[in-house]
Image (cartoon, coloured by chain):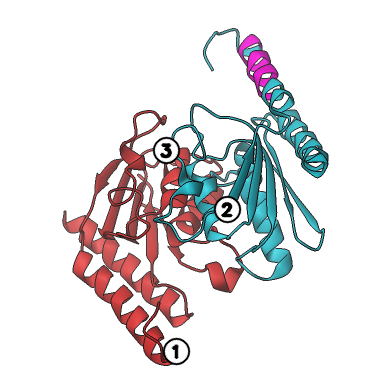
Chain colours: A cyan, B red
Amino acid sequence: MMDDRHYMQKALLLAETAAANGEVPVGALVVLPDGREFAGHNAPITLHDPSAHAEMRAMRAACAAVGNYRLNDATLYVTLEPCTMCAGAIVHARIGRVVYGADDPKTGAVTSLYQILADHRLNHQPTVTSGVMADECSALLKNFFRRRRQNRGTVAN
Amino acid sequence: MMDDRHYMQKALLLAETAAANGEVPVGALVVLPDGREFAGHNAPITLHDPSAHAEMRAMRAACAAVGNYRLNDATLYVTLEPCTMCAGAIVHARIGRVVYGADDPKTGAVTSLYQILADHRLNHQPTVTSGVMADECSALLKNFFRRRRQNRGTVAN
C-alpha cells in the first residue's frame, strides 16, 4: 500500500536517529485508527533499558496517550522484524496490524526464529505485512554494523 | 535453596500488591550480585502499559539504578513463568539466573509454550530454576481469578 511506504519512510528516519546515537538503527511508528502517530527509536544503551526497542517505545507512548494498555485496530510500523520481547508486547497490546521492513534471521520472532504473531495458543493474532522497503531498512543496518566494525578495527560484531 | 524461598516470599508479597490493585497477581524481584534488590509488581492496567509485567518493571528499575541495560550475574525471581515478552527482555538484559514459581500453561515461554531461555540461537541462556513455592504462587492466581469470576457473575476469565 502507498500508505505503508509513507509510514515506513518515517520509521526509517527514526532508525537514522537511533544510529546517530550509537544505537542499532531501528525505528517504529504506531498509527491509531484516528490518524494519531507515536514514534519510537531504538535506545536501550542510551536509556539503560533492555526493553527500549523502537516498537516498545512507540507502543508505550501510544498507550500512555490513549490511557489504555490495549491499542485495538492500531497499526505498528517497524523497520526490522520484531524480537520475542516485542512480539509478546504486540500481542499484549492487541495491535491490529504489524508492518515490518527487513527480516531479522538472528532474533526475529514473527517469521525467522519464531512465528509468535501467528500462534493461535496466544489470545491475539495481528495481521502481518513484511518486506515493506526492506532494502532500505536492511541497508541502514548493514551500513551501521560495517561502520562499527571499522571503528573498532575488528571483524566481529 | 533457602535463599530462593526467601526472595520468592518477597515476590509473593509483591504479587499480593498487584492483586490489591485489580491486576493479575504476579510479583518479581531482581537481586544483584552485591545484594541490592529491585521490586516489581504486575501493573499494565494501572499504568496503561502493556509492557508493565512484574519482571519487566523489576529489570527496568535495576537497569536504571546501575546505569546499564545489562544485568550480568543478577538473579530474577518471579512468581509466574515469564511470557515471550519477558523472556525476550531477560535475554536482552543478560540476567544470569531466573527462578520462577508456578508454570503458566497458557502463555509461559520458558517451559510451557516456548523454551526461549534455552534457545542457543539467541545470544544468552540464563540458568533456570522452576517450581519454587509453586503452590503458593499458583494459589494466589487461582484465588484472584475465582474472585473475579464471582464478582462478574460469569464463568469465563
Nearer the observer, B48 or A20? B48
Image quadrant in which you'd find residue A72: bottom right
Is residue B15 at least partly visible in the picture? yes
Residue A14: give x, y in percent of width and height: 76, 38
Q: Is residue A57 above or below residue A67?
A: above
On the image, numbered disc 2 is attached to which residue? A126
Which amino acid is tagged 2? Pro
Residue B94 is tagged as: 3
**Marks 1, 3 in one chain:** yes
The reply to whether the magenta stretch includes residue A148 is yes
**Marks 2, 1 in one chain:** no
On the image, numbered disc 1 is attached to which residue? B152
- SS state under label 3: loop
Residue B146 falls left or right of residue B86:
left
Q: Residue furthest front?
A: A1
Magenta region, residue range: A141-150
